[in-house]
Image: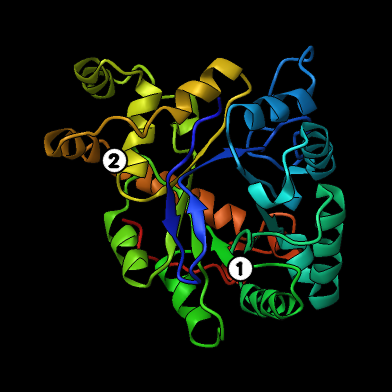
Amino acid sequence: QPMAVPTVRLRNGVEHPLIGYGTYKIGFVPASSNSASEPGHSPDQDPADIIKDALACGYRYIDCAQFYGNEKLVGKAISESKVPRAELFLVSKVWGDKMYEGREAILRQLDQTLEDLGTDYLDIYLVHWPVPGKHVAAYQVLEEALGAGKIRAIGISNYTREDYEELKAVARVPPVVNQIEVNPFLWRRKTYDYFMGEGVVLQSYRALRQGKEMGNPCVAEVAKKHGRTAAQILGRWCVQRNIVLVAKTVHKERMKENMAVFDFQLDEEDMKRLDGLTTPESLAEFKALYDKCVVRDTPLAALEPSEQGVKKEVLLD
C-alpha cells in the first residue's frame, strides 16, 4: 500500500505534496550538465521502470524539466503506470535557451512538455534559472499560459532574493514556489525566512546532498539517536520546515526509505546541530554555480563575465 503523503498549502489554495520524485538523469544526461560524465543509473536499468517504481511507492509529485531531456520517457512511464492524472502533481521547468529566444519559443516548449508528459495541464511550471535580462519576460509568458489553462500555477527556481525582487516589481501573479538547493550543508536561513515571509514555498533539490554526506559524523549521530538512516535525517530536516523534499534515487528500496520521514520528529537540538553544517565554502560554491547556470546554454555564456549581466551582490545565506 503506497503511503499517503502530507501536503503544504500554496498561496493559490492548492495542496502540494511534501515529497516528490526527481527525474534528473533518468534515461538521459544533458550535455551541459555539471557532471555530464556521470550516468544517472546503471545501463541494465530500464529508465521507465525506475519512474514506475517511484509511482508504485506512492510518489505523486513528479519533478520534471525541459533540460532533463526525458519528459517523453516520464510520460510513457506515467501512462503505463495507470495512475490517474488527477492523482498526480506534475511540475516542469523552462530552460534558459528558450527563455533567451522569447515568447514563441517558451509557448512551443510548454506545448512540447505537455505532449511529452501526455497531459493537457501542468500543476506548476517554473522558470528554471533567472537568466539575466530575460527571466522577467519569460515569467510573464507563463502568466499568459496560466490564463489559457495549460498550467495551474507558476513558480521560479534558483532565484535569489534579488532576482525575486526584480520579478516582483512587475509580476501580476506571484510565484507559488521557488525550487532551490536546500539541505543542512547549504542552509541559507535568511533566504528561507525571506521567501517564507513572501508566501513562496521552497522546493528543495539536492535535499540529500547527492548522497555525498551520508557518512557525515553529525548526521550519523542524529540518525543513530532516532534509529533512522542518514537519508531520512536529511529528508526530515527539510519537511519539518515545510520545505518540499525532492528526493532522487534509482533504487526502489531507497525510494521507500526516502519517503519514511513523516513518522518521527527531530528535536530542537538535532535541528540546531544540523543547521550548523553549512560552511563559507558551501556558500561560495553555491554562488559560483549560480553565476555559471544563469547563463548556461544561452549566448550570454560566450561573453566576458563582466558583460553577462549576472548579479554580483546577492543574498547568499
Q: In the rendering, which numbered label is found on residue 36?
A: none
Q: Which image quadrant is residue 315 in?
A: bottom left
In the displayed structure, 221 sits above or below 207; it is above
Residue 46 appears in view: yes
- Residue density around tag 2, few if under 14, some if 14–19, many if 20 or more, within 10 Å: some
Q: Which image quadrant is residue 76 in?
A: top right
Would residue 148 be found to the left or right of residue 235 on screen?
right
Would residue 7 be found to the left or right of residue 187 on screen?
right
In the displayed structure, 21 sits above or below 287; it is above
- Residue density around tag 1, few if under 14, some if 14–19, many if 20 or more, within 10 Å: many
* Residue type marked 1: Ala
Q: Nearer the viewer, residue 120 or 124?
A: 120
Residue at image location 39% in from the left, 50% down from the top: 243
Q: Secondary structure at mark 1?
A: loop
Could you tell me residue 53's position as x and y percent? 67, 24
Would residue 246 be found to the left or right of residue 75 on screen?
left
